[in-house]
Image (cartoon, grey):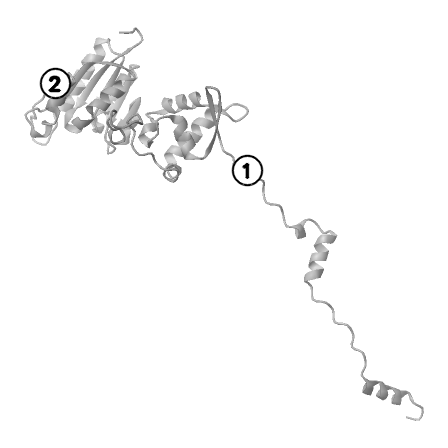
Amino acid sequence: MPATEKRIALLIDADNAPASKIEVILAEIARHGVANVRRAYGNWKSQHLVGWEKCLHTWAIRPIQQFAYTSGKNASDMAMVIDAMDLLYARNLDGFAIVSSDADFTPLVMRLRNDGLAVYGFGMEKTPQPFVRACSTFLYLEKLGEPEDDGDNGTRRARTTAELQHDADLVRLLRGAIDATQGEDGWSKLGSVGSHINNQGSFDPRNHGYRKLSDLIEAVDLFEVRRQGQVIEVRIRSTRDARGQPAARPVGRAGAGGASAAAEAAKAPARAAPKAPSKAGRAKAATKRAPGS
């Protein structure tokens, strides 16, 4: 095993995780390191966990039996937390992968990260946000397909541009990261943007249907992207650049010049010319001027 390869403990809350996703979960963990500890917790006498039985043997996952001491209570959570703390104090791991959709594990994740360990979370889209954001990264299992059946790294349908632009949290996150890392010319290196986002909390572009952050930023269509060799830079698209130059002001309002006066004069009704006197009128006027009249 390479010296730089991370050692990761995989802890599965079998009561709150689908067995059908174990292969893609292990494939994702392999991107970060080796899962040398693999445990699944639950009451294995329950019919609810029948689907996990084949997975345990196939993928060398150790089942941890935990009886339900009280009806309606899940005792597996406590057993899983105790084991996680024992593994933490052993000081021979670099990270944890927690598979669950239960927000009760949020304090555990915070404690593990407090000791500097990475925590990779996996759960359904119903997972409460406190648990999602507490993890170093969190992947929604609905967004991940079987690796051998999907040529796009297991990601499902990508969200449309309209859907992305209406996601206020996503747009605010991207804008804030680009604004915080931009240089004097307004451009930000994509690597710096990604690091800034990850430092704030759990984020993965695959949850939005895109394999890479650059693909997601281009799909949002609110940012400019330029490539110079292997370097990718992004910046916030200005309203002026997006819509062109401001519209010109109407000619008639540009001062009190002749153009404005001519326009106003053209709109004003023409003054009526004086009427010429009729023949009867001229005769009557001549009679008044005649002597003796």
Residue 55 seen in render: yes
Which residue is under mark 2?
57
Circle 1 SS class:
helix
Which residue is under mark 1?
240
Q: Tell me if residue 213 comes above or below residue 57 in the rendering.
A: below
Residue 110 seen in render: no
Under mark 2, the amino acid is His
Q: Is residue 147 left or right of residue 249?
A: left
Q: Is residue 263 left or right of residue 211?
A: right
Spot occupied by residue 24 in the image (x, y as percentages of width and height): 23, 24
Q: Is residue 161 left or right of residue 71?
A: right
Furthest-bottom residue in this view: 292
Q: Tell me if residue 162 comes above or below residue 201 in the rendering.
A: below
Q: CA distance from mark 2 to mark 1?
A: 61 Å
Write down the quadrant of residue 163 in the picture: top left
Spot occupied by residue 116 in the image (x, y as percentages of width and height): 30, 14
Q: Is residue 188 left or right of residue 158?
A: right
Write down the quadrant of residue 80 in the picture: top left
Under mark 1, the amino acid is Arg
Going from N to C along the chain, the mark reached first, 2 or 1, is 2
Write down the quadrant of residue 64 in the picture: top left
The structure residue drawn at horizontal position 85% and vertical position 85%, both measured from the top left corner, is: 282
If the image is split into quadrants, where does the C terminus sit?
bottom right
| Residue count near mark 1 (Cα–Cα under 10 Å), binned few <14, some 14–19, many ≥20 | few
Between disc 2 and disc 1, the foreground one is 2
